[in-house]
Amino acid sequence: MKKLASVFASLLLLLSTSVFAVDHVAAALEHANQAVIHGKAGHAPTLVEHAKAALEHSLAAAIESKGVPKTHLDAASASLQEAIDHGTLGHADLATKSAEEAVEHLKKAGGK
């Protein structure tokens, strides 16, 4: 009986970890999309705010992920950091391009 309870608890932990990663990917995707929208409008400071929020969620999801999704989350995080760097310098066009790359990686990582 203890063995069964232990297996069940492990299964629940595994499933809950996956749910948290999916939630972070969805939040990262939402913020990355907002970064793109504001970047296209030339609003570099607002792009940076959303890119920072997306980066936090992307990094959190990467911690909980593995395999191909983790590879895409790592790439998305790198692109978001580039968007932040370019946006901070006021280069909205370059920052937008980086944010768009992040969106594509987040979609491939499991975002909708």
Image (cartoon, grey):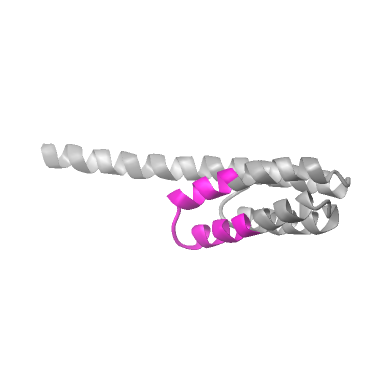
| In this picture, residue 100 sits left or right of residue 106 | right
Main secondary structure type of the part rendered in magenta: helix
Query: Is residue 75 found left or right of 100 in the rendered image?
Result: left
Q: Residue furthest left?
A: 1
Is residue 97 part of the magenta span, yes or no? no
Image position of 50 with respect to 100: above or below: above
Given residues 110 and 65, the one toward you in this image is 65
In the figure, residue 53 lies in which quadrant? top right
Residue 38 locus on image (x, y percent): 82, 43
- Rendered view: 68 above or below 88: below
Residue name at image x 61 percent, y 40 percent? 27
Residue 66, position in %: x, y? 44, 58
| In-front residue for pair 2/55 | 55
Q: Is 53 positioned to the left or the right of 20 in the image?
A: right
The residue most toward the right is 41
Whole-percent x, y for residue 77 in the image: 60, 55
The number of discs equals 0
Quadrant including the N terminus: top left
Q: Quadrant of residue 26?
A: top right
Q: Residue 23 vs residue 36: left or right?
A: left
- 112 or 80, nearer to the observer: 80
x%, y% of residue 48?
A: 74, 45
In the image, the segment drawn in magenta is: 56-78
